[in-house]
Amino acid sequence: MSARQARCCSGSQNPPPKLFTDAEVAAIGKQAAAQRAKTDALFAQWKAGHGATRDDKAFAAWAARQVPAPPSAKQRTAELHQVQVLAKARTAAGKKAATWLELYGKKDIWKLYLHDQRELTPEAQGTAEKAQLKAALKLAKTISDQLAAKDKQSAPFVLDPSLRPDKHINPGAKGPSSYPSRHAARSAAAVTYLSALSPHRAQDYEWMRSEVLYSASTWPATSPATSQPAPSSATSSATTNSPSAATDP
């Protein structure tokens, strides 16, 4: 286990296996960083119009409008084929890593990162930051779930159950949906929030986000293009009413 894995997972009852290499996750990390720049610019527009007053309902509606439309049927077919090719190249180690990331990448790992930070902050501040991270993750989930319910983009393993033999899919089932990805939305929100709290640790958070996103392709609940998160500043409405809010300035 690397030093940074030990830091983020110390005390865990289910510590991570060997995760994916930096080389494996580099490409999707670059894509996420480019997307972050775009969404930060979008958030600046929101903040200019709404200020720092919290309004989760209005922000969720606005954020949903910023997420690109789901891929066309032709693109989905091509993506499914891409996932099927990836599935043939899976290794036992890769499955183990992706399974761990699927289980803990939605919120547990981000809470553990914050717990480490709270060791260095006053109790009242740490309590407030814990509540803010929880609110940010919840808002990211709300936005992605609302869009998934509207767009009804079946996850790859629903279209091809052989991709996830561990999942029981009823014949004719359309769900669960995979666009936008909960994992992608939550990790984007968490990285935005945690990086603002502790900029010197941002590289670790971005690395973990890349691991989470890459795992969705290796053990696909989502496909490469369907991992589109809601705006990475989805923490914003949930946190901008606090002096310690972790939105980008």
Image (spheres, grey):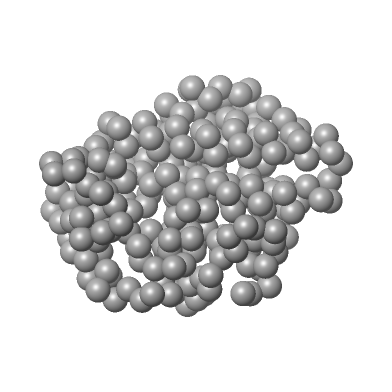
Residue 37 locus on image (x, y percent): 51, 52
**Residue 142 position (above or below residue 91):** above
**Residue in the image at 22% along x and 71% along y:** 85
Front residue of 5/236: it is: 5
Splitting the image into 4 quarters, where does residue 67 fall? top left
Q: Is residue 98 visible?
A: yes
Question: From what the image shows, is residue 228 above or below residue 20?
Answer: above
Residue 52 location (% of width, % of height): 64, 27
Relative to 172, 64 lies left or right: right
Could you tell me residue 70's position as x and y percent?
Answer: 26, 44
Which residue is depicted at the point 62% across and 57% down? Answer: 13
Residue 193 percent coordinates (x, y): 63, 45
- Picture layout, residue 177 above or below residue 9: above
Q: Quadrant of the N terminus?
A: bottom right
Name the residue rendered at 38%, 35% in the picture: 145
Residue lying at 14% horizontally and 48% vertically, measured from the top left: 73
Residue 243 relative to residue 249: left or right = right
Quarter of the image for the C terminus: give it.
Answer: top right
- The answer to which of 38 and 59 lies nearer the viewer is 59
